[in-house]
Image (cartoon, grey):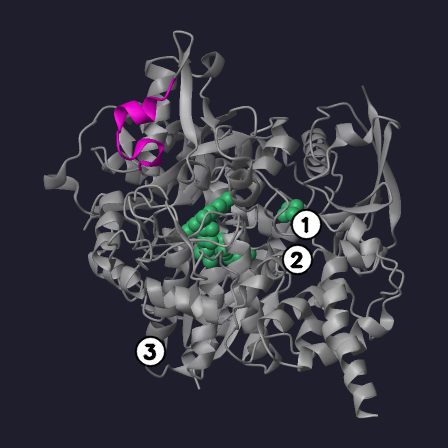
Amino acid sequence: MKNILVMGSGLAGMTAALKLVEEGAAVTLVSPAYSERAQSVMAMGGINAALNTKQENDSVDEHFADTMRGGSDLNDPEAVANLVQRAPEIIRWLEEIGVNFTRDEKGRVDLRNFGGQKKKRTAYAGARTGKQIATAIIAKCRKYEAAGQIKRLTGWRFHSLLIEGQECAGAVLLHENTNELQSLVADAVIMAVGGPNGVFGKTTGSRLNDGYAAGMLLEQGVEFSNLEMIQYHPTTVHTPSKRMLITEAARGVGGRLYVIREGQPWYFMEEWFPGYGALMPRDVVSQSIYKVCNEMKLGINGSQEVYLDVSHLSPEIIDVQLDEVVSICSKFLNVNPYKEPIPVAPGIHYFMGGIKTDKDHTTNLARLFAAGECSAQYHGANRLGGNSLLGAICGGWVAAESSLLVGPMDKAAAEKIGEQQLETANQELQHWEKRANTSIKGYVQIKQELSELMYGAMGIYRKERQLLEAKKRLEEMNNDTAESWYHHHFYEYKTLSANILLARGMVESALARKESRGAHQRIDYSEKNDTQFKKSTNAVFLNNSICIEFN
Amino acid sequence: MSIRINIKRQENGAKEAYWQSFEYSGELHVSIGTLINNLNSEMLEKDEGERPIRFDCSCEQGLCGACAMVVNEKPVLSCQLFCDDLVQENNEITIHPLSKFPVISDLAVDRSQMFEVMKDMKLWLEEPAKVRTANLTLQYEVSQCLMCGSCLEVCPNYSLGELFTGMSSAMSMTNLTLLSEDKAYKKQYTQRVYDGCSKSLACQEVCPMDIPIVEAISKMNRVSVWGMWNMFTKLR
Ligand SMILES: Cc1cc2nc3c(=O)[nH]c(=O)nc-3n(C[C@H](O)[C@H](O)[C@H](O)COP(=O)(O)OP(=O)(O)OC[C@H]3O[C@@H](n4cnc5c(N)ncnc54)[C@H](O)[C@@H]3O)c2cc1C
Ligand code: FES
């Protein structure tokens, strides 16, 4: 029986685990908190599948074309073909396991419009699609947990991979509260740890996705692709703790974007992009908002914000489909969206780049697989709304299927590596414990600076000079962290240097891509350059520096 | 304006709990979660070696249930409750961890028992879900349960490890019952919820998702307990 280690218990991790046990494998499912706390539950808008129930002649081919166009052809076409092909089957599976999708008048799964797609293709469950899907999948996992086939290790974090030659042999895990370490040997490891929000500090996503795992994997020689592709969701609102998402559904059901020009509302998206209007792909909407606020200086009171208006919609639509929007606005902004427009600005929302995988979700290391937002294959330079829940579930399935194909492993060699690496990890921990009384001033500053530096250099529009400055500063910061010390929490202490390394990967990738494509817009190279750059960036950490190639 | 924050602290389960007070004069239109983060930042700025306050959080927008704690004697999601709403009458805020679970550290508690009992009760579907559109709204509502533990905090009947498992499990049972024709959930419901519930309905007041708990359990009572009782009297 194969023994598979799955890191992360969001939708990607759980669907991988389910597929694995259904095929007779034993699964260890590791995450710092229960699946109810994973970022996946936050998804509101929906999940895409060309079910073609709206008399619009939708098809899998069109879903494919929209996804590739949205991703500016950096997506892996074979992977995308599989994704869109499997989408209807995924929706049927979700129905079968009891996801409470919103239904149309005939009792079928209802579909609605989402950005970057002209056809109604997004299935949804009220205003809480991610939560409703998670509830059903969690119940499904519970059955196998009770039978001992899925063993959940909750409270544990991925610490590092066990690597034997060019093969992954398992992983070292760290318990966040007790600092206990353990090493687990496995036939294969599937990474499903979500996006690296922590590198930027405030994003629309979950605090648990701190970016540690990605940084550590980069350090250990795992290849990453398209790290410069970071999605700014056009409609987020500022709160003291985070950026909060106003779902694309608000525009899907008819919400409009405007600013005041010469005393009148000016619906810039509708003027610039007749047909799609505010439902253009996210990168285009965010860039348009940037232009309106910076080049035309028409942002609300000179700020980076524009208005999102849903007040012309019927209250029933707002009640039913946008209740979350109402709740965010009234609680955090004191705005009543039934009556007033909502001030919004672009904010970091999704990482298209990540662990480089092929269509089978294999990585550059044998026996290591990756799925969900931590990995890159489906979304290219920009992901379409509703495609990432789909990508997480499909990716979980495919990674599971592929991981079952690995051959028998050398257990003894793996165990030996496991012992050695556990020893090294324990030594590092002891070293940390000994230095407990050193000052932490540097730590707090570096963390703040990292977030500011990244928001500055990796904004919606990027420039060579700023990127070079960031690169230089990140290298210095990397040296500074050796001097600063966070003695309150071992895992948090480790996270900082992992974040800095991943940040370097992002900045170097952005520097290397001397063109503008999808979510990556360069002021100094404002055109798309297909001859040189219709390829993915590939970042590797070698001899203490980041090397970028295109392939 | 300066306000006083009293927080019940405990380094870990093996150490003694103690109360600590903080003076806070920062921004007040912030959630309790942000307030604690601000206190921690101030502490770290000073760099006097003091231990930051631990609490769980993930989504910071009321969607994941991680951050439940007791504020001014009421269980709440700390990312959803704002300080300025609290200090209108009294310049003091008192915070302690959920009291029905073992403390991990400070305001973080170990809620694993809530999840474990649902395995014992076999709360999953054995057959493909049956879609009955009439039930959809209630199914949707009960599936919103965050497993935050607020309802158990105020429940006069719940304590850790006893037969009565409380409303978090009852919400799952309701969903599964509506989605299937399986009788097993009803039996579990009768034994582990109905028999132990004294209908204080305090849970309904505190549920952060406003799940219609009363409606859900009335439905369950109808289909499981009274349904069986009817059958029983007919047989007699
Ligand atoms: C507000 C919001 C709304 C969204 N709406 C939509 C939508 O409408 N449609 C759509 O398609 N997509 C949407 N998305 C994106 C989508 O939710 C995510 O991309 C998707 O859920 C990712 O799933 P995942 O399983 O890869 O990761 P996650 O659900 O993020 O899970 C990651 C898991 O890894 C764990 N983890 C983290 N670090 C470690 C570590 N070191 N070791 C072990 N485990 C670790 C976490 O605890 C968690 O269990 C939205 C995202 C946000 C933030
Ligand atoms: S942090 Fe998720 S509910 Fe508060």
- The residue located at (76%, 39%) in the rendering is B50
Estimate the spatial distance between the alpha carbons at disc 3 and disc 2, rounded to whole Å: 39 Å
Number of marks drawn: 3
The stretch of residues the image draws in magenta is: A266-280
> Which is more toward the observer, B166 or A420?
B166
In terms of image quadrants, where is residue A186? bottom left
Q: Which residue is mark 2?
A: B145
Estimate the spatial distance between the alpha carbons at disc 2 and disc 1, rounded to whole Å: 7 Å
Query: What amino acid is at disc 2?
Result: Cys
**Circle 3 or circle 1, nearest the eye:** 1
Marked residue chain, label 2: B
CB atoms of marks 3 and 2 within 8 Å: no
Marked residue chain, label 3: A
Query: What amino acid is at disc 3?
Result: Val
In terms of image quadrants, where is residue A444? top right
> Which is more toward the observer, A538 or A263?
A263
Query: What amino acid is at disc 1?
Result: Met
Indicate the secondary structure of the residue bearing disc 1: loop
Q: Which residue is mark 1?
A: B209
Label 3 in the same subunit as label 1: no
